[in-house]
Amino acid sequence: MKYKEHMADSDPNPFSHVPDRLSGLVDLSYNLWWSWHPEARVLFKRLNPHAWALSVHNPVKMIRDIPPSLLDRALADPGYMRRYDIIMHRFRRYMANQNGWFSSHYPNLRKHTIAYFSAEYGLHHSLPFYAGGLGFLAGDHLKEASDLGVPLVAVGFMYSEGYLHQHIRPDGWQDGIHEILNRDTAPTRRVLDSDGAPIIVRVPAIDPPLYVTVWKVEVGKIPLYLLDTDIAENDPAHRGISSQLYTPNREERLKQEIVLGIGGRKALNEMGISYTALHLNEGHPAFALLEQLRELVEAGASFADAIGDVRQTALFTTHTPVAAGTDVFERSLMDKYMSKYCAALGIDPEEFYALGLHPNDRHSCFNMTVFAMRMTGYCNGVSRRHGEVARGIWGCLWPERSIADVPIGAVTNGVHLPTWLNPRLEDLFNSHIGDVYPRWQEEHDVSEIWELIDEVPDEDLWQTHVWLKMKLINRIRERKRQNWADQRDKPENLVAEGMMLNPSVLTIGIARRFSTYKRADLIFHDPERLKRIVTNPWYPVQVIFAGKAHPADDEGKRVLQRIYQFAQQPAYSGRIAFVEDYGEQMAQYMVHGVDVWLNTPTPPLEACGTSGMKAALNGVLNMSILDGWWPEGYKGVNGWAFGATDPTVGRDAADAAEIYRILEDEVIPLYYTTDMDGIPHGWVAMMKRSIKSIAPHFSARRMMKDYVREYYSKSLNWANSALQMSIR
């Protein structure tokens, strides 16, 4: 079926005021390419900085709302128009380039397509479809696929009420406020059929009937299709299936995963988009495998042969380091929604349910991770350590193999450098690395290039870092000022939320989801010792906390409340702060501006963790427990590590004692030891070692190339071979 895209239909022509000469601004605003190209963002900001701020850095909203007089002023400004023409040329050249890294290395595979299914995507705060690290990993995956020319198409959900804003009461308890997405001003377009009507897809073989409409987000060259159940065709009880991310209601969660997996593949088919290989980002969309099976069976294949074909071209990435973290569904729920689907597959329900039953609990629930691992030919964890943990957890699915031979590999996560590297640092690196190697950004996964960081003068790197720290603290203060002016803040909240932070003080950042295993409050294990550290009159320390607890996680909320109440205590002299409503925008400020990134989860419960990678790109030093990615990243001279062995005393007590010791004996002396020029050269030397050792190896570029080499190319080559066999 032919299809096209259109913005939301509440205003048939919301950009009629934009002159033809500037019409490229509309095209650019709907492609998130601008979000990882600072020069493109400046194009919008230069129209009017106040309008850019009012739009909360959302160019679709800004261009819709901007007065025509400001566009006329831009037309009359030769400097602006020169910049506009150059940036639009770069954008169009980027979009038209079909000869990227993938095509040059795998020319025989360039005609294939890989489908990437994920329950969440962290792309930009103008599209709040994310909960945390899993979503931002997915977002960085799409951006890097675009930059490398990997032929990817992505599927997710249009969460109309999916983003939770956080408000902290004076007593420190978290309240949640759901943001209703304004589809008119989001950078997403409705997909229309050939007659110009919104495309409507029925999820096949499911009773009661479920329908979705489809929206498209352009992530550079990568199309992301978002499924939306809030349409008149659905029963009112089903319209909210796609409204909220990770609903705690088990039946609603099952319906979500049916719609995402089965409905997602069906939607791609309806739009005429076929794919050769499938990548499942966690178990939530695993039912996409079922729809592929159903189509093969419907075309005449046996169920066993269909499973064989599906497995050869499917990859499952697990992010869960504990078996209890997977989605499981009771048999009664599966019977309610999947019995008709079993009939469509031509199999007995018991044969279907057996695919999702844990071998050690064969009469219980349907496990989505077990199902995904049985149905995919390739499986990976998201760090080397997590791969080891996953093989130990799920080795029971391959009882004939030793743990070392369990077919679960590892691709360590990475972060998208153009998104997370601060533009001011980028300019600094351009001045020194770019002089020697102008293509450094295109080849930023080459470690030798980063040795040129040593040629950046200590003074320049340190002054840039201090500027970024001041920017972070000013941002925190300005948010509190605005809340106070809007009469949305209590006096007792101001100190607790950062009004007394000092940019000259050693600053530790702790930002994460508030789950108990993350141990965000570990640093308060000995409150008196911490008090002595942060209030030292000669060498003070301040700690900035940020993050949210899941709405249903009261234990996580209590951890958050405990930290907030410490921040309210005068005895800590305003050295503890909690930043309310942590999101993608504040994350940028945090990973750019703190001095130390502290990570304290209970091992081995950190699958990977990417925030520390983002911080390291920007010269922030990691101090982390040896779990997730840090055992690969820690080199002994590029940050600090603790928790290497199982303690003889309690885990919390031992780890907290190590944190205090490292701070007192190593971190604080290094930070405050300066030469006569006021620069802590020893600290800057460690910043450089951190950047050199982490930036190339923990980039999304390296990660994406690993996925292509280890998994995508194998799936696509198998498909090529199968096609040749069928032709013969």
Image (spheres, grey):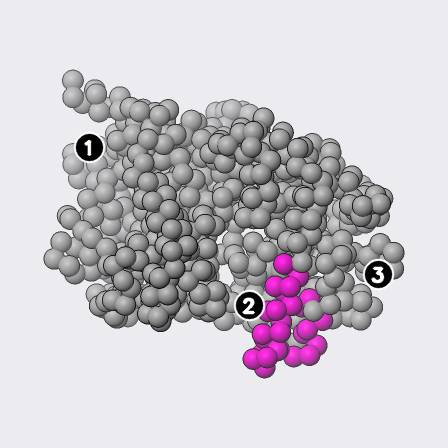
Secondary structure category for the residue under label 1: loop
Which sits earlier in the primary sequence, circle 3 or circle 2?
2
Relative depth, front residue between 381 and 677: 677
Please name the residue shown 60% across and 35% down the image. 432
Q: For label 3, count other residues whose C-alpha is less than 10 Å away and answer few (under 14), some (14-19) or many (20+).
A: some
Q: Does the magenta stretch include residue 292?
A: no
Compute the Cα span from label 1 to label 2: 51 Å
Secondary structure category for the residue under label 3: loop
Q: Which mark is residue 535?
A: 3
Kindly identify the amino acid type of the residue bearing the numbered disc 3.
Thr
Q: Quadrant of residue 145?
A: top left
Q: For label 1, count other residues whose C-alpha is less than 10 Å away and answer few (under 14), some (14-19) or many (20+).
A: some
Residue 440 percent location from the top left of the image: 51, 33
Compute the Cα span from label 1 to label 3: 71 Å
Which sits earlier in the primary sequence, circle 1 or circle 2?
2
Q: Residue 301 carries which label?
A: 1
Q: Is residue 178 above or below residue 455?
A: below
Residue 108 percent location from the top left of the image: 29, 24
| Numbered range of the magenta stretch | 471-498
In which quadrant is the C terminus drawn?
top left
Q: Name the residue under label 2.
A: 166
In the current view of this chain or complex, which residue is farthest to the bottom? 487
